Amino acid sequence: MSVPTVPADAAEVAPARMSRREVLQALSGLMVGMFVSILASTVVANALPRIIADLNGSQTVYTWIVTTELLAMTATVPLWGKLADLYSKKLLIQSSLGLFVIGSLIAGFTPNVEVLLVSRIVQGVGAGGMTALATIVMAAMIPPRELGRYAGIFGAVFGVGTIAGPLIGGVLVDTSWLGWRWCFLIGVPFTLLSIFLLQRTLHLPVVRREVRIDWLGAALITTGVSLLLVWSSLAGHKFAWASGWTALMVAGGVAVLAVAVFVESRAAEPIVPLDIFRNRTVSLATVASVLVGVAMFGGTVFLSQYFQISLGKSPTVAGLMSLPMIFGLLVSSTVAGQLITRYGRWKIFLVAGGAVMTAGMVLLGTIGAGTSVVVLSIYMAVLGIGVGMLMQNLVLAAQNDVPAQELGAATSVLTFFRSMGGAIGVSALGAVLANRVTDLMTERLGPAATGGGGSAAVPDLSTLPEPLLRIVQDVYGTATAELFLVGAPLALLAMVVVLFIKEKPLHTLSGDERRAQEEAAQAAAVGH
């Protein structure tokens, strides 16, 4: 039996590895782009009341300014990931950043809410590309054995962008000579800087081969996911969770996704290769990513409201109070990445992250209107530390366990499900919070407090008399704490899921080097 040999020109196929200096230079552009893309999803949180007032928008528009961007970002991630396996990653990532700039400029100069909603969709498509492609480009440049060092920093950037958004937005709104339009415009110069840095420093080989994009599959996936995200954002306040609209939208979304699965199973170049879920690590990491998304997005969104209503803080102060979570996530993500690179072991950080995240959710389940800032800061730091150890290392585990040609698909699948988990989780937990606030207000003040049993409106604390103010603050503190107790079992489930991920040694070759090696081996096998 003859042993397959590597062709003589295999060395020419293998790309030259970038030096550490070149990697760091390219990463600087990626990190800037990643930060502003994630920031776009959260920076408007504290600016929405002012935006709605200035543009004469309704409560429905209030919700959709956030939802449209998140929906467009989540729904297009799989398409960007697939394109990265087929076309120039450098061109794709610069295209996504260009779309983000266009959307940001339109939003910053928008004359009305209709144009603003369109601009948020454009922003979301660009942000989806950046979110998916940044990690894919990292895996193409850096071997998994060394990726922890850089992935930790990237995980920190992602977390900081998510959590710091409300702080930056609050400061911009409270600064008279800036205003809410700068929530959109602030990212433009940084995005242009990212494009410039990537043009000069990112050098990746372009794999040229005949390609076919499964546009039908992409359309079906986007439509199905969009229906479910629209339902989750409207259910609970536009219509009841148990209603005809819920049945119609959920059944429609599931049906479209079922057709998408059928189409993908027969496509030559599927957007989401179904075979990838036969990989145990990818499947388990996907489930864990959904649960981490719920904890990360849910925690930041509802803590910001708790600061402002239950504790009576201004938007800027509310943003500053989120810093302990930022620092916890930053430190744990960076330190875990460095230790993974040094020792090559990564599962212990996934398990520890799940345990610490669960502890943080349970601790935050004890807060109330009288919780001290010091105690609250400790609890938030614990949650941040847990999320920091889990988030990016789930991606690392999956990337390490798939063939090089599936790196883009595996990365985008995890990013997609983490974003979708966050979107649906925020909507569902938001509905739970609203219902609990309504019940508590009715219990303490009678049906008149909720307009005869309807949903309670978010109060203007400055207009409430002292006794009523205390009741409202206590109600929101209690309801927010109960929300974290609802989320704690999900965090515990994430820990249980990662226990079943099998630890494998980290590769010492980058994604592009592995791909060249795999293709050379395949060519040699065909030759024999």
Image (tube, rainbow, N blue to C red):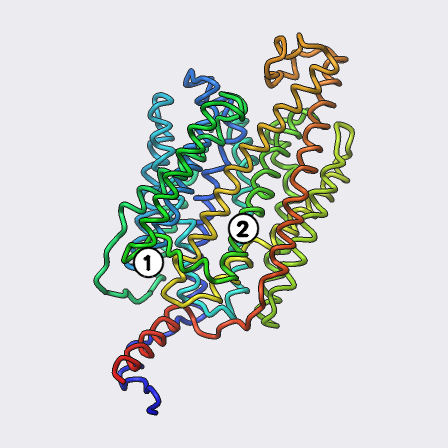
- Look at the image and tell me whether residue 177 can be seen: no
- Residue type indicated by callout 2: Ser
Location of residue 277 with respect to 361 vertically, above or below: below
Upstream in sequence: badge 1 or badge 2:
1
Residue topped by disc 1: 89
Q: Which residue is disc 2 drawn over?
A: 289
Q: Do callouts 1 and 2 mark residues in contact (Cβ within 8 Å)? A: no
Q: How many labels sit on residues?
A: 2
CA gap, disc 1 and disc 2: 24 Å
Kindly indicate the quadrant of the structure image that contains residue 211.
bottom left
Q: Position of residue 48 (x, y in %)?
A: 49, 25
Task: Give residue 222's position: percent from left, percent from top.
Answer: 36, 41
Where is 199 relative to 184, above or below?
below
Q: Nearer the viewer, mark 1 or mark 2?
A: 2
Residue beneath the point at 77% across and 13% down: 467
Amino acid under disc 1: Lys
